[in-house]
Amino acid sequence: HTDGVPVLRRSTRESHIPEKYRFVRLTSQLDNDPKTYGEAMSDINSDKWIVGMKSEMDLMGSNQVWTLVDPPKGARPVGCKWVYKCKLEANGEVTAFKARLVAKGYYSTTWGQF
């Protein structure tokens, strides 16, 4: 304890991934999907990402996912972001460029009380 505050210790043990899960590390190393809209638009496959985003917007429209309205006075709308993912065959060949529009999942204390 330092002035009543406990000191945190980190383990010095070496961690080992079980053999059956080692493929997860390999696939995460191959993950070159864009993390932001800007990255997707500067990617060599930007035209395919645009098609994926248009497809997502068309699906949301046909499924009546939302209705555009003006927010009530003082309300702060939840933000959203694009999430991009290349779908791959077992041999690593890209089969589709998927784009999903998702709500940002964080809460800021500056937003006020619920």
Image (cartoon, rainbow, N blue to C red):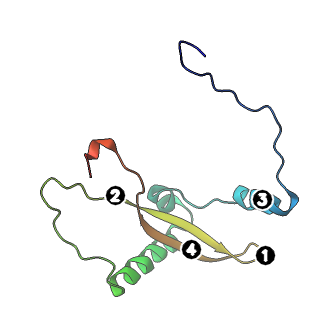
**Badge number at residue 97:** 4
C-alpha gap between disc 3 and disc 1: 14 Å
Residue receiving disc 1: 91
Q: Residue at x 33, y 82 (%)?
A: 61
Disc 1 residue type (three-letter): Asn
> Residue 7 lies in what quarter of the image?
top right
- Characterize the local packing of mark 3: few (<14), some (14-19) or many (20 or more) Cα atoms within 10 angstroms: few
First reached walking from the N terminus: tag 3 or tag 1: 3
C-alpha gap between disc 3 and disc 2: 32 Å
Disc 4 residue type (three-letter): Phe
Residue sitting at the far left: 73
* Residue 36 placement (x, y as % from top left): 48, 56
56 over 35 or under it: above or below: below
C-alpha gap between disc 4 and disc 1: 16 Å
Task: From the viewer's perspective, tell me whether residue 7 is left or right of residue 111.
Answer: right
For mark 3, give the secondary structure. helix
Residue receiving disc 3: 26
First reached walking from the N terminus: tag 3 or tag 2: 3
Q: Residue at x 58, y 68 (%)?
A: 85
Residue receiving disc 2: 79
Mark 4 or mark 3, which is nearer to you?
3
Q: Residue at x 77, y 76 (%)?
A: 90
49 over 58 or under it: above or below: above
First reached walking from the N terminus: tag 4 or tag 2: 2
First reached walking from the N terminus: tag 4 or tag 1: 1
Mark 3 or mark 1, which is nearer to you?
3
